[in-house]
Image (tube, rainbow, N blue to C red):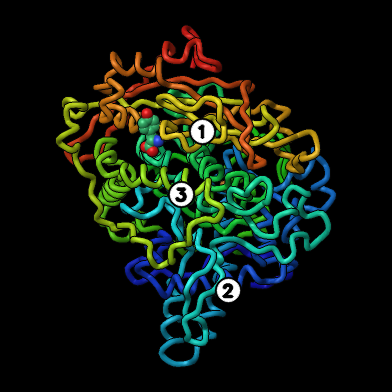
Amino acid sequence: MSTTGNIAITGILTTAGSDGSFPLRRELRDLQRNFPDHYNLLVLALKDFQALNESVQTSYYQIAGIHGLPYKPWNGVGSNSDWQSTSGFGGYCTHSSILFLTWHRPYLALFEQALYNSIQKIANQFPEGALRTKYVEAAKTFRMPYFDWATQPPSGSSAFPSAFTSPTVQVVDVNGKTKSTPNPLYRFVFHPVNPSPDDFPAQWSRFPTTVRYPNPRTGQSQDNRVAPILANELASLRTNVSLLLLSYTNFDAFSFNRWDPNTNPGEFGSLEDVHNEIHDRTGGGGHMSSLDVSSFDPLFWLHHTNVDRLWAIWQDLNPDSFLSPRPAPYSTFNSTQGESQTKDTPLTPFWDKSATKFWTSEEIQDTTTTFGYAYPETQEWKYKTGSEYQAAIRQAVTALYGTNVFANFAAANVQARAAEHTQLVKSLSLATPPPPVPVTAEKPLLITQEMKASPIPEELQHLAPHNKYPEWVVNIRAQKHGLHGAFRVIVFLGPINEDDPDSWQTEFNAVGRVSVLGRSTQGPTTTKCAKCITDAAEELMISGTVPLTSALLQDIVNENTGLQSLQPDEVVPYLKKELKWKVTMFETGEEKNCVEVPGLRVSVTSTEVTIGEDGLPDYSGEYVVYPEITDGKPGGLKEGEHI
Ligand SMILES: N[C@@H](Cc1ccc(O)cc1)C(=O)O
Ligand SMILES: [Cu+2]
């Protein structure tokens, strides 16, 4: 890859196999367990890539810097002065816009192709002979792994893989000897933090490495906090992913989180919304929590690869729906605010294969193979017909994220989670975190092409007479920059410790959240992102969802609650009493209780789901709104109000 002139974004240059196949981007734990040579290459190459001089265009530092800070032009696209003016080039970020998904695809391809340079370099450093042959061979099919944060981790293993939390990792080094080495997925070590003056404001300059859940006093990363927080809201998140993939049929609704008055009752969620909450839940006030700096955490890349995968899956189920033109919410290098953003809008700063013009959404919609990869679920070449292929995708999705909430519930290891919860509470009071688990200890996820949906378990069948049940969803709308910073709305079902914001995320009764990555447009931490400034001026509204059914089921199984069915006659009075929500700001790592949120509106809807003979849910029913549940609560939808 040349480092002068326009860098073409090609992904890893690949020709299809004779059967039409492409190498797969695999789940991290699958790669680690079942493809140890690929994993070994990943560790060595990512270290090599991260160590590149930060002034090199294709270094880890510079590529990460395209997303937010330092807000300087990359690859000659835009000039420094463009970045300064708020009416001009507002940076490259595309969140809350129709281009959210498509912009990140070439971005990931760029990362993958740069990482791949290091992969090839490393493979060829092994001593000539069997060892080199083995790694050079493995390098050919190496692709970027993803972290599937929505799937049920195998029982007894952590919701946040030790591959991210272990400070060190065992590898076979290029001399053929096994050694322990700093783990490049654990964190990125800046070298230095500000290679050019003022890359980062003081808030971020103080961290010499990326951090997760930094201790507000010492700045120390507390990675052991991530797993229990991921586990605690996992059941609801899985339903959310299942709903998005199987019930949303419109690209605009599926893809991004901007709310407008015409949003359908069943479409308050989006992949962007689910993606936001992972930033929040893994960041804990550290780098992942802030769009300005999240891409410096290595986790960002595996997280976004999963987002790209979920989109690829959805797109192949809905090949005819794609983005419809919208007025640009902000100005960029190529389009001015208010001008139509379409599938032909250039995705700056990503030059296409010709390196003379930019990639557009249209060119990358259909297929990931343009960039030389596929996902386990999107191996289209294995199927004779489109409908066989789609049926296989549906089966795989339901097996991973929810055949139906009942099978999901039975599969979820509630006991393991409860134990993890106790461990978290204990570890918070310990001076030193528990010792890291060796990376190889992780259990593999089962990801196969033949995964089958399973039927409703017998002991829960009475809750879904004739295989029908109501799916309950909380919808949340708020003004994105209304609090001048990032905040979340956490939804609870049942009693909580009302007075202690620090404990809310780990309350067992926390069901899920909508995380809002708002930013400041005034004061000392003012963002340089021009898009955010115009968004704020426009009072941009966003929305998100928290599926409730899994928590309701837990309450049904827990006999102390008195709840016995999922039907409205029981659930409505129950929710009226037990449903609550809290808002906290989290940007600084400290939890700040916020009572008033501009534009907040919380509503509850349900829709009837039918589970087919094949175990697949049919989500095509109408949504019913229940204002009586939220009326009278702060920010709740009132009787007679339009959703
Ligand atoms: N936190 C629970 C979800 C839940 C929330 C509230 C409840 O009342 C019950 C269950 C989980 O991890 O699955
Ligand atoms: Cu992101």
Residue labelled with disc 2? 117
Residue labelled with disc 1? 504
Question: Which mark sits nearer the N-terminus, 2 or 1?
Answer: 2
Question: Could one spot residue 386 in this view of the protein?
Answer: no
- Determine the image quadrant of residue 566: top left
For the point 47% across and 28% down, the residue is 491
Image quarter hosting the N terminus: bottom right
Estimate the x, y position of residue 603 in percent, counting from the top left. 46, 20
* 201 or 423, nearer to the observer: 423
What amino acid is labelled 2 in the image?
Answer: Asn
Q: Residues within 10 Å of mark 2 (few under 14, many from 20)?
A: some
Q: Residue 227 carries which label?
A: 3
SS at mark 3 in the image: helix
What amino acid is labelled 3 in the image?
Answer: Ala
What amino acid is labelled 1 in the image?
Answer: Trp
Q: Residues within 10 Å of mark 3 (few under 14, many from 20)?
A: many
- Determine the image quadrant of residue 448: bottom left
Q: Which residue lies furthest to the top in this view?
A: 640
Q: Can you say whether 279 is above or below 22 in the image?
A: above
Tell whether label 1 touches label 2 (CB within 8 Å): no
For the point 58% across and 62% down, the residue is 111
Question: Which mark sits nearer the N-terminus, 3 or 2?
Answer: 2
For the point 68% across and 54% down, the residue is 66
Real-space Cα separation, disc 2 to disc 1, in angstroms: 44 Å
Q: Can you say whether 159 is above or below 594 in the image?
A: below
Real-space Cα separation, disc 1 to disc 3, in angstroms: 15 Å
Real-space Cα separation, disc 3 to disc 2, in angstroms: 32 Å
Q: Can you say whether 121 is above or below 69 in the image?
A: below
* 549 or 377, nearer to the observer: 549
